[in-house]
Amino acid sequence: MITGRLSVVALVALALIIAGPGCSINEVRTVEGLVVDVTGTSPSDIQAFSLRRADGAVFRFEAGDVGFGHGGFPAAHLREHLALADPVRVTYRTDGERLITVRLEDVET
Protein backbone atom coordinates (compact mmCIF):
# COMPACT_ATOMS: atom_id res chain seq x y z
CA MET A 1 0.00 0.00 0.00
CA ILE A 2 2.75 2.48 0.92
CA THR A 3 4.79 1.42 -2.09
CA GLY A 4 1.83 2.18 -4.38
CA ARG A 5 1.39 5.64 -2.89
CA LEU A 6 5.11 6.35 -3.17
CA SER A 7 5.04 5.32 -6.82
CA VAL A 8 2.18 7.72 -7.54
CA VAL A 9 3.93 10.55 -5.68
CA ALA A 10 7.17 9.81 -7.53
CA LEU A 11 5.38 9.83 -10.91
CA VAL A 12 3.65 13.13 -10.14
CA ALA A 13 6.94 14.69 -8.99
CA LEU A 14 8.69 13.47 -12.14
CA ALA A 15 5.93 14.88 -14.34
CA LEU A 16 6.21 18.27 -12.62
CA ILE A 17 9.98 18.29 -13.04
CA ILE A 18 9.70 17.48 -16.73
CA ALA A 19 6.76 19.83 -17.43
CA GLY A 20 8.09 22.75 -15.36
CA PRO A 21 10.95 23.89 -17.61
CA GLY A 22 9.14 22.71 -20.74
CA CYS A 23 6.28 25.14 -20.18
CA SER A 24 8.48 28.12 -20.95
CA ILE A 25 10.17 26.73 -24.07
CA ASN A 26 8.55 27.43 -27.43
CA GLU A 27 5.33 28.70 -25.86
CA VAL A 28 3.65 30.93 -28.47
CA ARG A 29 2.11 34.23 -27.34
CA THR A 30 0.86 37.47 -28.89
CA VAL A 31 1.27 41.06 -27.74
CA GLU A 32 0.30 44.44 -29.22
CA GLY A 33 2.02 47.76 -28.71
CA LEU A 34 4.26 50.48 -30.06
CA VAL A 35 7.71 49.87 -31.50
CA VAL A 36 10.12 51.93 -29.37
CA ASP A 37 13.50 50.70 -30.63
CA VAL A 38 14.93 48.85 -33.63
CA THR A 39 18.41 47.32 -33.78
CA GLY A 40 20.05 46.30 -37.05
CA THR A 41 23.16 46.68 -39.15
CA SER A 42 21.36 48.63 -41.91
CA PRO A 43 17.91 50.03 -42.72
CA SER A 44 16.98 46.74 -44.41
CA ASP A 45 18.33 44.54 -41.60
CA ILE A 46 16.62 44.08 -38.25
CA GLN A 47 18.15 41.89 -35.60
CA ALA A 48 15.93 42.93 -32.68
CA PHE A 49 13.30 45.46 -31.64
CA SER A 50 11.48 46.61 -28.52
CA LEU A 51 7.76 47.01 -28.11
CA ARG A 52 5.91 48.91 -25.37
CA ARG A 53 2.48 47.59 -24.43
CA ALA A 54 -0.32 50.01 -23.41
CA ASP A 55 0.30 49.24 -19.72
CA GLY A 56 3.95 50.36 -20.08
CA ALA A 57 5.54 46.90 -20.12
CA VAL A 58 8.43 46.71 -22.59
CA PHE A 59 9.35 43.54 -24.49
CA ARG A 60 12.61 42.94 -26.40
CA PHE A 61 12.21 40.64 -29.40
CA GLU A 62 14.76 38.89 -31.56
CA ALA A 63 13.93 38.99 -35.27
CA GLY A 64 13.58 35.23 -35.55
CA ASP A 65 12.18 33.89 -38.82
CA VAL A 66 9.97 36.87 -39.66
CA GLY A 67 11.81 37.35 -42.94
CA PHE A 68 12.38 41.10 -42.84
CA GLY A 69 12.81 42.10 -46.47
CA HIS A 70 12.36 38.55 -47.75
CA GLY A 71 8.63 38.45 -48.43
CA GLY A 72 7.73 38.87 -44.76
CA PHE A 73 7.12 42.07 -42.82
CA PRO A 74 9.48 44.59 -44.49
CA ALA A 75 12.18 46.10 -42.28
CA ALA A 76 11.37 49.57 -43.62
CA HIS A 77 7.73 49.09 -42.63
CA LEU A 78 8.69 48.24 -39.04
CA ARG A 79 10.83 51.37 -38.97
CA GLU A 80 7.77 53.34 -40.19
CA HIS A 81 5.84 52.00 -37.21
CA LEU A 82 8.64 53.26 -34.98
CA ALA A 83 8.61 56.73 -36.55
CA LEU A 84 4.81 57.11 -36.72
CA ALA A 85 3.95 55.39 -33.42
CA ASP A 86 1.60 52.99 -35.18
CA PRO A 87 0.92 49.80 -33.19
CA VAL A 88 1.94 46.31 -34.28
CA ARG A 89 0.93 42.83 -33.18
CA VAL A 90 3.82 40.46 -32.47
CA THR A 91 3.38 36.72 -32.28
CA TYR A 92 6.42 35.22 -30.61
CA ARG A 93 7.77 32.08 -29.02
CA THR A 94 9.76 31.88 -25.87
CA ASP A 95 13.05 30.09 -25.45
CA GLY A 96 14.00 30.56 -21.84
CA GLU A 97 14.32 34.33 -21.40
CA ARG A 98 14.51 34.97 -25.15
CA LEU A 99 11.48 36.27 -27.09
CA ILE A 100 11.72 35.22 -30.72
CA THR A 101 9.43 36.80 -33.31
CA VAL A 102 7.29 34.41 -35.31
CA ARG A 103 4.93 36.87 -37.03
CA LEU A 104 4.36 40.65 -37.24
CA GLU A 105 1.11 42.34 -38.25
CA ASP A 106 -0.28 45.85 -38.51
CA VAL A 107 -2.89 46.69 -35.89
CA GLU A 108 -5.94 48.47 -37.25
CA THR A 109 -6.56 51.65 -35.27
Image (cartoon, rainbow, N blue to C red):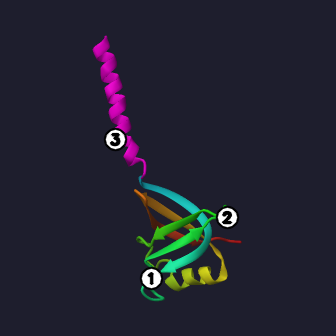
| Quarter of the N terminus within the rendering | top left
The answer to the question of whether label 2 and label 1 lie on touching residues, with beta carbons closer than 8 A, is no
Residues rendered magenta in the picture? 1-24
Residue bearing mark 1: 40
Question: How far apart in space, not on screen, are marks 2 and 1 (Cα)?
Answer: 25 Å
The answer to the question of whether label 1 and label 3 lie on touching residues, with beta carbons closer than 8 A, is no
- Which labelled disc corresponds to residue 108? none
Question: How far apart in space, not on screen, are marks 1 and 3 (Cα)?
Answer: 37 Å
Image: 86 above or below 31: below
The answer to which of marks 1 and 3 sits earlier in the sequence is: 3
Secondary structure type for disc 2 = loop
Q: Where is residue 81 drawn, in percent x and y? A: 61, 79
The amino acid type found where label 2 is placed reads Ala
Image: 35 above or below 42: above
Residue bearing mark 3: 18
The answer to which of marks 2 and 1 sits earlier in the sequence is: 1
Q: Quadrant of residue 27?
A: bottom left
Secondary structure type for disc 1 = loop
24 to the left or right of 57: left
The answer to which of marks 2 and 3 sits earlier in the sequence is: 3
Say which residue appears at 62% left-offset and 68% top-offset: 33
65 to the left or right of 52: left
SS assignment for the magenta stretch, majority: helix
The amino acid type found where label 3 is placed reads Ile
Say which residue appears at 57% left-offset and 70% top-offset: 51
The amino acid type found where label 1 is placed reads Gly
Q: Where is residue 4 drawn, in percent x and y? A: 30, 16
* Residue extending farthest right: 109
Observer-nearest of 42 and 68: 42
